[in-house]
Structure formats: structure tokens, C-alpha cells
Amino acid sequence: MSDLPVIRVHHPHVVLDEDGSPLIAGTRVPVRRLFSWHRQGTAIETILRRYPQLGPARIFDALAFAYDNLELVTADLVREREALAKEQGTPPPPPTTPKERSEEARRAQATLPFKK
């Protein structure tokens, strides 16, 4: 059973995996990944280049799902970070000020796993 919050608003292009994490239907692409990149400032066009098989409708629906179910997607992101922290050791504390968040987002943009 999932420890994540329940879905508040269902969307046609989003399903839950066996752990309760939202995925884009017919793929293994987690909504949290697209949401995280979008929140960091990644352009939709860049996401489309990374995932051309998704098409704009599924990407926009996944982002709409994330905003409609912010509590669920945020909890899924936290759960992923905690799992990575266990695997890799203790991560640095999360940024707290807007300037720190902006700098972290800029660094994260530089390390996206696809070409611009």
C-alpha cells in the first residue's frame, strides 16, 4: 500500500504504478520528473525534445495533474529524494532562500540528461 496522498483530480494521461507514484500512461516516465524540471524552469519544448514519444498533450496533462495534485507529487518527490539519500549517503540540506533555490535550479538545468 502506498504512503502517498490520494489523487484529488484524475487526468486521462496519468496512472499510478504499484507504489502509488504517478506515471504518464503507457510509459515509465514519472510525473514528478516532468514537474520537477518544469518548476526549475525547463521549457516545455526542451521536455518535448527529451520525450518526443509523449507529445504535447500528455506532457501538459501530466503537468496539469501535478498542479491539481500538488500534495501527491510533492510527497512523491520527497520519497524519491529520501530513497536517493539512503542510496548515496546524506544529501546537503535543501535550499531555503529564493536566491539559493534559483542557484540550485540553474545548476540542475546544467546537468539535465539531454541536449538543449
Image: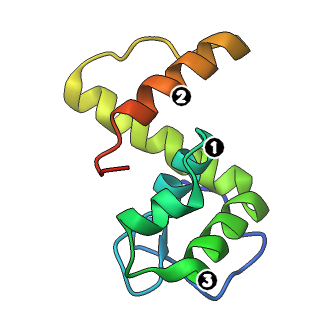
Going from N to C along the chain, the mark reached first, 1 or 2, is 1
Q: What residue is rendered at 62% in x and 20% in y?
A: 101
Q: Is residue 2 left or right of residue 70?
A: left
Q: Are marks 2 and 3 in contact (CB under 8 Å)?
A: no
SS at mark 3? helix
Q: Does residue 2 show up?
A: no
Residue 47 point in image, percent of width and height: 47, 61
Q: Nearer the viewer, residue 45 or 55?
A: 45
Q: Amino acid at mark 2?
A: Ala
Q: Are marks 3 and 1 in contact (CB under 8 Å)?
A: no
Give the CA separation, mark 3 to mark 1: 18 Å
Q: Amino acid at mark 3?
A: Ala
Residue 10 point in image, percent of width and height: 71, 80
Kindly identify which residue carries mark 1: 39
Q: What residue is rendered at 64% in x and 56% in y?
A: 72
In the rendered image, which quarter is residue 44 located in? bottom right
Q: Are marks 1 and 2 in contact (CB under 8 Å)?
A: yes
Going from N to C along the chain, the mark reached first, 3 or 1, is 1
Kindly identify which residue carries mark 2: 105
Q: Is residue 55 left or right of residue 111?
A: right
Relative to 30, does residue 95 appear above or below in the rendering?
above
In the rendered image, which quarter is residue 56 located in? bottom right
SS at mark 1? helix
Give the CA separation, mark 1 to mark 2: 9 Å
Q: Which mark is residue 57?
A: 3
Estimate how packed mark 2 is, as few (under 14), some (14 to 19) or many (20 or more) residues with alpha carbons within 10 Å: some
Give the CA separation, mark 2 to mark 3: 25 Å
Estimate how packed mark 3 is, as few (under 14), some (14 to 19) or many (20 or more) residues with alpha carbons within 10 Å: few
Q: Amino acid at mark 1?
A: Arg
